[in-house]
Amino acid sequence: MRWSTWFTNHRTAYPSRVIAAPPADDGYRMHARVDRGRVQLLTRTGLDWSHRYRRTVEILGTLPAQTAYLDGELCALLPDGISSFSRLQAAMDEGHTDQLIFFAFDLLYLNGENLGPQPLVERKERLQGLLKRDVSGLRFSEHVVGGSSRASFPSGSIGRTPLATGAFGSNQNA
């Protein structure tokens, strides 16, 4: 089974009110599949874009995991740290994708263990542990926590908006 198919089949419906959401980074939503030294960057529709982002693939290959499936967003940052979709597109057009950042916000599979049924807060803790080394081009992404009308943004997330929602203490996917 294709991992993108696995991911699609294991998503659950979101509650009507926002509990936790990864901030949108004005980038490309990507799934990173790590499988015994082979890394793929997949779009949400399952297209393999690994060849477009070789540096990001190299970085993800350094993770201390035999197998993993991460959900995240590939972004280009402005000097002030805010993401810019136009800068991401320019980096792709010019072939300068080595400075892009993969913001990982969920960990759905790790070393043979399906983490999808676990509460999001537990998956986030496992993801944070996986990303504990400071690696240029790879960052842990906090979630926005709050109700649907108000949300508490983590520090450093100014200008970011939720892109998906899930119950933080449940097994909702983000």
Image: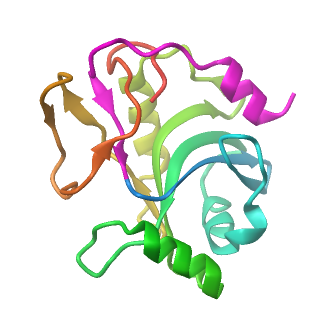
Residue 65: percent from the left, percent from the top? 65, 46
Q: How was the colour assigned to the protein in this rendering?
A: rainbow
- For the point 46% across and 35% down, which residue is it? 126
Question: Is 119 drawn above or below residue 136 in the view shown?
Answer: above
Q: In this rendering, would 116 be left or right of 68?
A: left
Q: Quadrant of the N terminus?
A: top right
Q: Quadrant of the C terminus?
A: top left
Nearer to us in this view, 114 or 106: 106
Question: Is 82 drawn above or below residue 66 in the view shown?
Answer: below
- For the point 83% across and 33% down, which residue is it? 2
Question: Is 121 drawn above or below residue 124 in the view shown?
Answer: above
Q: Is residue 5 highlighted in magenta?
A: yes
Q: In this rendering, would 117 be left or right of 20?
A: right
Residue 101 visible? The answer is: yes
Question: Is 100 drawn above or below residue 3 in the view shown?
Answer: below
Q: Residue furthest right?
A: 1
- For the point 41% across and 24% down, which residue is it? 120
Q: Is residue 9 highlighted in magenta?
A: yes
Q: Residue furthest front?
A: 86
Q: In this rendering, would 105 be left or right of 4?
A: left
Q: In this rendering, would 22 be left or right of 80?
A: right
Residue 97: percent from the left, percent from the top? 59, 78
The magenta segment: 1-24
Residue 55: percent from the left, percent from the top? 64, 74
Nearer to us in this view, 105 or 126: 105
Residue 136 visible? The answer is: no
